[in-house]
């Protein structure tokens, strides 16, 4: 589904992502792990489109997306969450979710005046779906609160809800478990598995190895901008080179 | 006496409501979209000059003077101001906050200087006179004329308000809010942030142009000094005091600040000795500035917050 081919990205000094190639198959949950500074989030930014690679290419379902503007990539069913969640703080939870719906006619200026009935009907459907999505992530109780009141964990759930609203086929989750209490962590893990059960392909950056081992069918390990290992979690997490980068520290 | 007060009241309100239209345009750009446009005066000027040049009688040595109907002048004022906003926006909207402010300020200054110096196009420092006034046939009956004019301005304001309110509550307005609050997140959800920003900038600029045209036809005369940065400052003060992000706040702020401006002008006129009046007139900017600072201290989100 996703193919990353020899992608390199630097910000002036040593490359942060250095000739990385990997693939994510349709329907799998792939984990991307590695010590801080390994280039994982940069890799996500390259795939999602807030950064452009210096070299290499990124293909989604065989279509090259690395040159496309970021907003266009959502049209290919690609969606992401952020390490530090980015809710729209002044908007209510339900508005946060509704805004994520794709291809709304009412997002054009003129249809609001030329086809008001159509826009209203569509917006009612968007609201219904947003309610379902809010229910799914367990935010129904907070639906009409401004997003700024949400806790860190709830913000991660809200981002998940927004991503779902875009109707994604591939979701990039950047540390969904970071800073989340254990009870909520269970909820988030459960939701990720449920989404995957619905056929959504998922790629996760995560430091919680228990969660990685539980969720991911396959793990990719990055260190110092390079892919150093990949395979089944049980196997990779015992790999001496991987243990070395995590526990022994990587040469800086 | 009563007739005088009534005449002054209608004149005052008509002017204030014209400012309110400009302020609604700025509210769309800043209040809803977060575009720091400090070139308001430039877009008002474009609308005023466009309509004036098209509707005035032919003038030797100056462009325009086609004597077109007022309605045509107003519509083309909207179109030309929108086109100018599109050009400016296309170039500058990738810039963030303070850089956008600097460039829009520069654009407005350039427009004002062109109006001042391009005499064959704009009439130069003498401005353009004989701009036809709506209901001119009723000019003899002053009171009726003023009331009709006020009603016309109020009707345009109401129409602009209703259009903007509908848009604010629409999916379009929701996307603008999302872009204002976190652009990166909005883009990651597939929203073309630059495209939406450009739309809001163009629509806001078109509204400012319309207001400029209305004002020009109300007074019947325009000159470059009407469109100095002080105008931009006034409109910003109106929006901040009234309540940025709230269309009703924008209208309320326009009426209040214009009231403050007119009242302080009258006070200076009657209190300050004649020799110092020209200099004392700048105190009006101080008064509005004080009001602005007070609001920012006591009600930082304005009188009618979003």
Image (spheres, grey):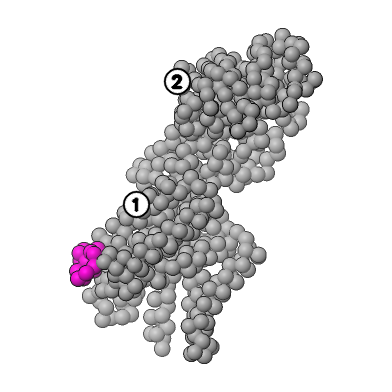
Q: Residues within 10 Å of mark 1 (few under 14, many from 20)?
A: some
Q: Which residue is the site of mark 1?
A: B83
Quadrant holding the C terminus of chain B: bottom right
Tell me which residue sits at (41%, 88%) in the image. Answer: B1
Q: Are marks 2 and 1 on the same chain?
A: no
Residue A190 pos. (x, y %): 67, 22
Quadrant of the rendered structure where residue B6 is? bottom left
Q: Residues within 10 Å of mark 2 (few under 14, many from 20)?
A: few
Tell me which residue sits at (41%, 51%) in the image. Answer: B88
Chain assignment, label 1? B
Residue A124 pos. (x, y %): 47, 38
Q: Is residue A172 above or below residue B93?
A: above
Q: Which residue is the site of mark 2?
A: A63
Callout 2 touching callout 1 (CB < 8 Å): no
Tell me which residue sits at (19%, 71%) in the image. Answer: B60
Count of marks overlaid on the render: 2
Give the residues drawn in magenta, as a range: B52-71
Q: Is residue B181 visible?
A: yes
Chain assignment, label 2? A
Report the side of B146 relative to B37 (left or right).
Answer: left
Predominant secondary structure, magenta span: loop
Residue B194 pos. (x, y %): 46, 42
Q: Is residue A189 visible?
A: no
Please tell me which residue lies in front, B212 or A238: A238
């Amino acid at each position: 589904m996703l193919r990353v081919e020899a992608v390199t990205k630097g910000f002036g000094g040593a490359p942060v992502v250095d000739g990385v190639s990997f693939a994510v198959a349709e329907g799998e949950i792939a984990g991307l792990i590695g010590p801080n500074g390994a280039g994982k989030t940069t890799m996500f930014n390259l795939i999602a489109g807030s950064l452009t690679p210096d070299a290499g290419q990124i293909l989604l379902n065989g279509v090259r997306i690395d040159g496309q503007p970021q907003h266009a990539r959502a049209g290919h069913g690609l969606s992401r969450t952020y390490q530090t969640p980015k809710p729209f703080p002044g908007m209510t939870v339900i508005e946060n979710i509704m805004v994520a719906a794709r291809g709304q006619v009412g997002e054009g200026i003129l249809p609001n005046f030329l086809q008001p009935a159509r826009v209203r009907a569509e917006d009612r459907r968007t609201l219904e779906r947003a309610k379902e999505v809010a229910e799914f992530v367990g935010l129904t109780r907070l639906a009409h609160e401004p997003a700024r009141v949400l806790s860190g964990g709830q913000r991660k759930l809200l981002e998940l809800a927004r991503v779902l609203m875009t109707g994604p086929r591939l979701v990039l989750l950047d540390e969904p478990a970071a800073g989340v209490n254990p009870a909520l962590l269970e909820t988030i893990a459960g939701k990720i598995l449920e989404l995957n059960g619905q056929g959504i392909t998922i790629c996760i950056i995560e430091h919680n190895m228990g969660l990685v081992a539980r969720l991911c069918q396959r793990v990719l390990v990055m260190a110092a901008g390079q892919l150093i290992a990949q395979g089944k979690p049980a196997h990779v997490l015992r790999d001496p080179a991987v243990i070395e980068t995590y526990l022994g520290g990587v040469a800086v | 006496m009563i007739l005088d007060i009534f005449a002054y009241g209608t004149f005052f309100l008509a002017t204030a409501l014209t400012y309110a239209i400009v302020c609604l345009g700025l509210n769309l750009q800043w209040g809803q979209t977060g575009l720091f446009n400090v070139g308001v005066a430039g877009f008002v000027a474009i609308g005023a000059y466009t309509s004036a040049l098209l509707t005035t009688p032919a003038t030797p040595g100056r462009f325009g003077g086609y004597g077109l109907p007022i309605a045509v002048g107003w519509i083309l004022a909207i179109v030309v101001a929108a086109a100018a906003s599109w050009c400016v926006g296309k170039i500058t909207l990738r810039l963030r906050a303070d850089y956008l402010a600097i460039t829009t300020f520069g654009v407005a200054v350039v427009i004002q200087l062109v109006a001042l110096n391009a005499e064959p196009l704009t009439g130069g420092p003498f401005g353009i006179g004989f701009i036809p006034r709506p209901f001119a046939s009723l000019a003899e009956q002053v009171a009726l004329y003023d009331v009709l004019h006020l009603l016309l301005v109020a009707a345009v304001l109401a129409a602009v308000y209703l259009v903007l309110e509908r848009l604010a509550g629409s999916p379009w307005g929701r996307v603008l809010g999302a872009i204002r609050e976190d652009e990166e997140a909005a883009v990651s959800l597939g929203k073309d942030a630059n495209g939406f920003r450009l739309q809001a900038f163009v629509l806001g600029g078109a509204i400012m142009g319309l207001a400029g045209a209305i004002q020009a036809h109300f007074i019947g005369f325009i000159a470059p000094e009407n469109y100095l940065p002080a105008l931009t400052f006034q409109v910003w003060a109106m929006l901040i005091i009234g309540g940025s992000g709230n269309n009703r706040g924008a209208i309320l702020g326009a009426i209040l600040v214009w009231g403050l401006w007119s009242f302080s002008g009258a006070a200076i006129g009657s209190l300050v000795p004649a020799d110092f009046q020209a200099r004392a007139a700048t105190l009006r900017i101080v008064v509005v500035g004080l009001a602005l600072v007070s609001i920012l201290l006591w009600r930082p989100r304005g009188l009618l917050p979003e």
